[in-house]
Image: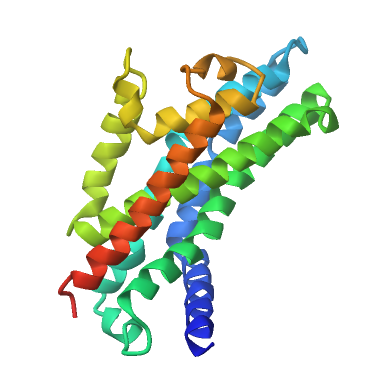
Amino acid sequence: MRSTKATLALVKMTFWQLLRTRRFVALLVLGCIPLALVAYWAYSTSDNMMPYDFYSDFTLIVYLQLVMPIIALINGTALIRDEIENKTISYLVTRSFSRRKLVIGRFIGYVPVAFILISAPITASYLIVGLTKGGISANLDILGAFILLAFIGVVVYGAFFNLMGVTFKHPLMIGLLFTFIWEVMLANMPGRIPYVTIMFYLRSFAAGIIDAGTVPFWDNGISHWHAAAVLVGIALAAVALAMNRFAKKSVV
């Protein structure tokens, strides 16, 4: 019971710690910048032809392929690495609170913060398109699908980047290379090369639950349930590896 209370306290502390930083404000601004493009399109386009086709393509390309990985990268790599660099890790790790619990507690606290950062602009974009082109209530299934994708994305990418933060001394630079070279470039290569990226499975999952815009064309021959299983497996493996890696790491 005491251990569970300690873990919940760490989750709550991590949540408020991340929420009150300048990093959160900067990432929120970053996520809101694309809203200007959505507003420009909504107010400059005279016809009402398939506005949610535009919304779907824009959300997939801008928010899920670019903004979301950056949010997960900056927050995920900092969960443990910041405590190590600030010399505060020794205050968090005690005999009654193991390193493994520290990793999982910090990660759980990160998830809602990252989810807020990406789901807020995705919802705002939906409202802009709906208010200017009509049909907010008729297309809530599209919004719900993207919100689900955002949640899955911040969990999987966050778990992966948290592992990077535990493993490498300078994870941010490595994470940037991974995000923009591995995830963006390889995910758009022909053949089976994209199978080695997280983005491939996110887009495959999206193709199975969204029928607007070009999103359904990202169906790469695997079912969205198969894609979901791979994503869950990646997240669980990354968290487990991070816990094991940090448990053996000499930092205090």
Q: Quadrant of the C terminus?
A: bottom left
Residue at point 34%, 23% (across, down): 194
Query: Can residue 62 be seen by looking at this rendering?
Result: no
Please provide percent x and percent y for residue 14.
47, 71
Please provide percent x and percent y for residue 107.
43, 63
Q: How is the image coloured?
A: rainbow
Vertical side of 86 occupied by 97: above or below: below
Residue at point 38%, 45% (across, down): 234
Q: Camera-side residue: 73 or 128?
A: 73
Q: Quadrant of the N terminus?
A: bottom right
Residue at point 27%, 38% (across, down): 178
Give left or right: position of 101 versus 50. left
Q: Quadrant of residue 245?
A: bottom left
Vertical side of 133 occupied by 67: above or below: below
Vertical side of 166 occupied by 211: above or below: above
Count the marks. 0
Residue at point 62%, 16% (across, down): 213
Please provide percent x and percent y for residue 153.
49, 43
Q: Camera-side residue: 247 or 66?
A: 247
Q: Quadrant of residue 48?
A: top right
